[in-house]
């Protein structure tokens, strides 16, 4: 089974100049990206947990690499 592209991502909560928080996401062999803005560090941590759960579920189901059915294409 293939690994979800974000399955090996690392996450780091960082504070922003405005006093809010962001999450730096690093996926191997790519440049880091930042997801913002979270009002609290706890909100950023909760986002990380939800994202990791989603990635794990999609990886187990193998859904992340399947093409949508012909009738389900969004336009």
Image (spheres, grey):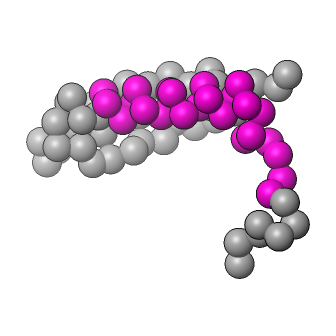
Answer left or right for 9 relative to 46.
right
- Residue at 30% over, 27% down: 45
Direction bottom: furthest residue: 75
Q: Is residue 54 magenta?
A: yes
Answer left or right for 27 relative to 66.
left
Examine the rendering and report whether any part of residue 56 can be seen. Answer: yes
Q: Whole-percent x and y of residue 1?
A: 85, 22
| Vertical order, 28 against 40 (above or below) | above
Q: Whole-percent x and y of residue 55?
A: 59, 31
For residue 31, which quarter of the picture?
top right
Q: Whole-percent x and y of residue 52?
A: 50, 27
Q: Which secondary structure type mostly characterizes the magenta part of the structure? A: helix
User: In what quadrant of the picture does the C terminus appear?
Assistant: bottom right
- Residue at 71% over, 25% down: 60
- Residue at 36% over, 35% down: 47
Direction left: furthest residue: 19
For residue 69, which quarter of the picture?
bottom right
Question: How many numbered circles are shown?
Answer: 0
Q: Is residue 48 magenta?
A: yes
- Residue at 77% over, 66% down: 72
Q: Whole-percent x and y of residue 51?
A: 47, 34
| Vertical order, 48 against 67 (above or below) | above
Stretch of the chain drawn in magenta: 45-68
């Amino acid at each position: 089974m293939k690994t979800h592209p974000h399955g090996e991502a690392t996450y780091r909560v960082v504070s922003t100049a405005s006093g809010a928080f962001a999450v730096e996401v690093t996926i191997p062999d790519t440049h880091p990206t930042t997801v913002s803005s979270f009002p609290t560090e706890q909100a950023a941590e909760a986002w990380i947990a939800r994202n990791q759960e989603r990635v794990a579920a999609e990886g187990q189901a193998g859904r992340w690499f399947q093409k949508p059915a012909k009738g389900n294409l969004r336009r």
